[in-house]
Image (spheres, rainbow, N blue to C red):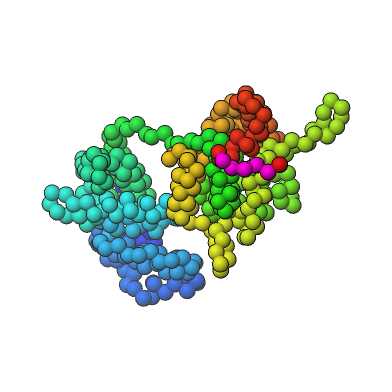
Amino acid sequence: MEKPLPRFVIGKAVGDETRFYWTLPTYYRKLGCLLHKQNDTALGTEYEKACKRAVALNGLFDEWDRARLGEAPVAPIAGKPGTVDWLFRIYKGSLDWKERVSKRTAPDHELTIRLFCDIRGKSGVRIGDRMIAAISPNAADKVYEKVRTTPVRKGKAERPRTAEKVVAICRHAWSVVHRLHPEFFKEKVPNPWEGVAMKHRRKAVKAAVTRDDVYAFAWGAVNKGYPAVAAAAVICFEWLQRPENVLAGYVSWNDYRGRNAPTMIRIEHHKTGEMVLHPLEETTLDADNQAVRTLFYEEAEDILAKVPKSGLGIVMRDRPAGPIKWDPFSMGRLVRSLRDDLGLPKTFTLDACRHGGMTELEEAELTDGQGRALSAHRSKAYEGYAKRTAKRALAATRKRHAYRMTMSTEDSTDFETEKDLARPRGSSVSV
């Protein structure tokens, strides 16, 4: 069985031995790459040494190629080829990292990688300085146990979630780099991170706030001069957009009753790449053949009407120099301050607003497909034959609206309007 060769390496039989050469493809030579002229591409006859020299040349090529494409250079990580530090450098420079790790999650991944690489064993040697082949399944089990049982926060006895992230990221990184550079891995030795026995933990259920809480917050925010914050809560609850997408400007004024869809709001879900058109109204004929207009999200639109159109995005932060996008930390602090002032539960967050909206879909007894038509969630078993259409979205919206109207009627014991019930206590109502 022939040994695997690194990228761009070929072997030529000369007599009784094989000589290895690093060969830059003609395509890149025509693009101006001169690495084949600037470096010795004859790698010798010893397989191990040839592979190590090829890795160095491939690293130089990757840096040249990233510069050609206008991408930022990857910061070098200390460590020779074949070490754990080197493995993560290759992983972070791979197409897999670029395509599968979002900008939102990349910083957290990098912190987890740094935590893992800086762990020291009984010998005092950093894991990042060890060779890849030295990380056995037994060593992987010990790393998981060490991370899980060494919390850094007061009052915590364990950090199971962090330990799980270490295992998941290492398992994937090992798989990616093994495919690209199999010469640094032991033959027929499985990924050491596969099958790590992790302690079962009871995952916390994410908080979900009610419709009353959402609109109490929204009207309270409007009254205190923060209509954009009110709109953020309403968009997360009613149209199920993720908070980070709301703050990043993925819903704009052009998406709300736009020229091409004057009766809809367009919601983009960056995580899944899905775009959902939510119907805002419907006109039907009654028994007397008279047109009846139904507004599905009347109160939500009343909130949006309070938001000044200071920028392209609906949720913008006003500044003297011009509106800017909200950063999650500033928005989070303001939401917490407003909820405390309004006497709302400590669990109230924009994420809890979205989960409250998802909970309402279930309470309205929408079918699984109708719920996904509104939330843009994916299911492999469902995607093969079910399609999201405007007709299905309209049917789901009708059912959700009917549920809300029914619950409003059952819960009302006096003649207060729905807006009055949603407003914070003590707020005035104009007549």
Q: Main secondary structure of the magenta part?
A: loop
Q: Is residue 51 above or below residue 146?
A: below
Q: Of 3 and 6, which appears nearest the observer?
A: 6
Q: Position of residue 395 (x, y in %)?
A: 68, 32
Vertical side of 4 occupied by 198: above or below: above
Looking at the rendered image, the quarter that the C terminus falls into is top right
Q: Residue at x 62, y 60 (%)?
A: 311
Residue extending furthest bottom? 38
Residue 285 coordinates in the image, percent (x, y): 82, 31
Extreme residue in the left direction: 123
Question: Is 239 situated left or right of 133 in this image?
Answer: right
Quadrant hosting residue 86: bottom left
Is residue 340 one of those drawn in magenta? no
Is residue 349 visible in the rendered image? The answer is no
Position of residue 152 in the picture relative to residue 379 (left or right): left
67 or 161, nearer to the observer = 161
Query: Magenta span has 427?
Result: yes
Residue nearer the viewer, 303 or 166 = 303
Can residue 176 be seen here? The reply is yes
- Numbered circles on residues, count: 0
Q: Residue 300: which quarter of the image?
A: top right
Residue 240 locus on image (x, y percent): 56, 41
Tell me which corner region of the image, top left, top right, bottom left or bottom right, holds residue 131.
Answer: bottom left
Q: Which residues are magenta?
A: 426-430
Q: In the drawing, does residue 128 fall left or right of residue 270? A: left
Q: Residue at x 21, y 49 (%)?
A: 134
Question: Observer-nearest residue: 144 or 299?
Answer: 299
What's the residue at 64%, 34% (across, down)?
418
Q: Residue at x 35, y 65 (%)?
A: 75
Q: Position of residue 7 (x, y in %)?
A: 38, 59
